[in-house]
Amino acid sequence: MTTTTGPVPARRGMTRKQRRLTLIGLALAVLGVAAGLVLYALSGSITLFHSPTDIVEKNVQPGQRIRLGGLVETGSVRRGENMHVSFVVTDGRTTIPVAYRGVLPDLFREGQGVVTEGVLEPGRQFRADSVLARHDETYMPKEVADALKQQGHWKPGDPPPNPNARPPEGSR
């Protein structure tokens, strides 16, 4: 006795609309994974800005790579042999000594805004491997200006101090 079954219904494939939605969903998933990988890769190279007071208050550990910003303290720049330069960065409340070896930007001056990138060493000494100085009369990194405003050393609307400015005629 053989049993015959009726015709087997053919499996219908996905409709054109279902294929399109599946393809779009797959593309979005791949894009999401790619964006996540890019953000993860960049997270290790991002260095945050810290003022000298932030370094003390947040207890930044030696050996950590950071950006230090503030004003170059007047009278603190010392030039040594082999392009060694040392200076002090201040935000008005706290100072951090900085050691740097290399050519300083042309606009690097005492009393001017500066952002240095490097490593904090034991004893709160900062070893910089790059120094950025302001590029015109009105520029100061936003973070430096904000830190100075919080400290009460720079009021909105006031230009940053310029120690290289000449006194007006007749005041000499």
Image (cartoon, rainbow, N blue to C red):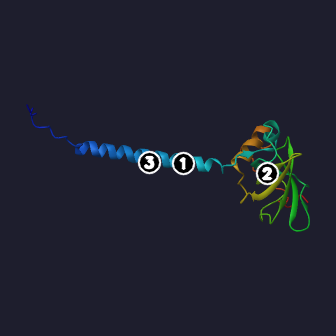
Q: Residue at x 10, y 37 (%)?
A: 7
Numbered badge on residue 30:
3
**What amino acid is at disc 3?**
Val
Q: If the image is split into quadrants, where does the N terminus sit?
A: top left
Residue at the image point whose x is 77% and y is 50% from the top: 160
Q: Please report contact status of discs 1 and 3: CB closer than 8 Å, yes or no.
A: no
Q: CA distance from mark 1 to mark 2?
A: 27 Å
Q: Is residue 79 visible?
A: yes
The answer, for residue 114, to whether it is visible in the render is no
Of badges 2 and 3, the one in the foreground is 3
- Alpha-carbon neighbours of circle 1 within 10 Å: few (<14), some, or many (≥20)? few
Residue 27 lies left or right of residue 143; in this view the side is left
Taking 40 as reference, is 52 left or right? right
Residue drawn at point x = 77 percent, y = 47 percent: 64
The answer to whether the residue labelled 1 contacts the one labelled 2, judged by CB atoms less than 8 Å apart, is: no
Mark 1 residue element: helix
Q: Is residue 103 above or below residue 44?
A: below
Q: Within the image, what quadrant is residue 106 found in?
A: bottom right
Closer to the chain start, of discs 2 and 3, is 3
Instruction: State the mark number for residue 37.
Output: 1
Question: In this image, 125 relative to 117: left or right?
Answer: right
Locate residue 55, reporting x and y percent: 80, 41
Disc 2 packing (10 Å; few <14; some 14–19; many ≥20): many
Q: Amino acid at mark 2?
A: Val
Taking depth in this image into account, of 106 and 45 the one nearest to the observer is 45
Foreground pick, 139 / 49: 49
Q: Position of residue 3 (x, y in %)?
A: 9, 32
